[in-house]
Amino acid sequence: MEKQRGNILYSLDWFTIALYLLLAVMGWFAICGAGNSYMKTDILDFFALSERTGKQAMWMGVSMIVGMMLMFIDKRSYEFSSRFIYVGLILLGILTIFISKDIKGSRSWITIGSFGIQPAEFMKFGTALALASFMNRYGFALNKKGDFLKCLAIIFLPLLVIICQNETGSALVYLSFFIVLYREGMTGIVLLAAISAVVYFVVGIGYESVMFEGLPVSVGHYAVTVLIQAFAIGMVFFWCRSAKGALVLLVTNLVVSLATYWTAVYLFSFDILYVQYALLLFDVVYMFIRARVDRQNKFLWTILFVVLSTLFFHSCDYVFNNVMKPHQKVRIEVLLGLKEDLAGAGYNVHQSKIAIGSGGVWGKGFLKGTQTKLKYVPEQDTDFIFCTIGEEQGFLGSTFVLVVFVLFVLRLLVLAERQGDTFGRVYGYSLVAIFFFHFFINIGMVLGITPVIGIPLPFFSYGGSSFLGFSILLFSFLRIDADRKL
């Protein structure tokens, strides 16, 4: 043990630590800019614990101390204690639902005096450890149905707990763990299903009210049926390895669709969507026959994909129009460009774009952002912290922050790939997935290209729980990586 302690400083990846410190310092200065006002005259005010900047500086110090303490815990201890940490954090998350106060509709904070702690930020650490430990077991195979379902249970249990806390944004982060499963051998069909579901929803809802060439059919509904056909043909060609089957489906769908379109436009008008459904039925029957003839079950899975795709889209259509609350519908409509609501759901994003755009190339300078000083952007030191960077540091400063984040994620990817066992690799990829999801979604929502779901930008957004949670994730992995050389 003494030998290990003597070598730990040499074994640590100092480049990653340097990137971490750089992000932390830049994040603190961004919070200073976001919290600055015309009333502040003394720079020491930024270190007062009555100010958010002072509290953030304190949490940064606490996080670094905790990070150093994590250096004394070896890899075997992390793996051994993973199930206890996971179960303990899940129970704490459940307890939070009942004992926490309602804060902006969320019951996810445990308040201790003037400070609050959010257990959901630490559940990501527990989930990553538990998933890595489980997948490192002897005899584990992701293609085994039982093992795969247990992995899903490990991921979805904390997700459901956080949803019960009414923290949907934080819950969606857990979907990033599917990147880990894909790296470990999960079939790409699952990712295709996820991507296609998003495409169906965006296209179907986005063009629902647009009529197709004056015909009694929605462009959105028609386009989704065509997309399902296209995905099915692609799966038959690339996954089922049947060029002949894909050609038959392509020619049949294309010829019938064009003939139907010409008839409806130039002869007599009718709802051509029914013909598309008939073509989907033909595709299903044809693939079933090929499955029996070629004795290949992949055709049956493709049939299931077609059926579930159709059911999913119609369920989304029903949920969007009949189940979602008005404010939820408005957020989606604003995101898809169906509605402009600059005084309501789209206000944050609109003001954020103004702040970023006003920064120009060089920015207005540290503490000189007018949009920031006048508090035009709500949550500008938490979820929308990136707009402060854009206004004060301009395009060049924003680009520098993005480059550092990309280097940070890529470095974690390198560390994950060089691990000698499944535990270290899975835990490393969990970090990559979590940081990338936060980074992409947070900056995307500030720029108006992803939904506003309220998740922090790592090491930048104000919040002790998030900063400490991200630091624990990182330093525990750095210790695991250092054990390769000890």
Image: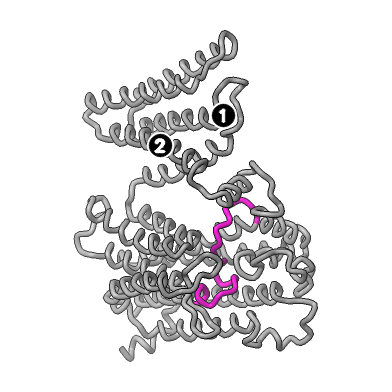
Q: Position of residue 175 (x, y in %)?
A: 42, 56
For image coordinates 44% across by 76% down, the residue present is 472
Q: Quadrant of residue 75?
A: bottom left
For image coordinates 59% across by 70% down, the residue present is 461
Q: Is residue 444 magenta?
A: no
Q: Quadrant of residue 304?
A: top left
What mark, if any, has residue 317 been given in the picture? none
Residue 434 position (above or below residue 101): above
Residue range of the region highlighted in magenta in the rendering: 447-468
Can residue 476 be seen at all in this image of the molecule?
A: yes
Count all numbered tags in the image, as a single digit. Answer: 2
Q: Position of residue 428 (x, y in %)?
A: 40, 66
| Residue hosting label 1 | 219
The majority secondary structure of the magenta stretch comes to loop
Q: Quadrant of residue 315?
A: top left
Q: How would you rate the neighbour count of disc 2 (Cα within 10 Å): few for under 14, some for 14-19, many for 20 or more?
A: many
What mark, if any, has residue 309 been given in the picture? 2
Task: Name the element at disc 2.
Answer: helix
Disc 1 residue type?
A: Val
Disc 2 residue type?
A: Ser
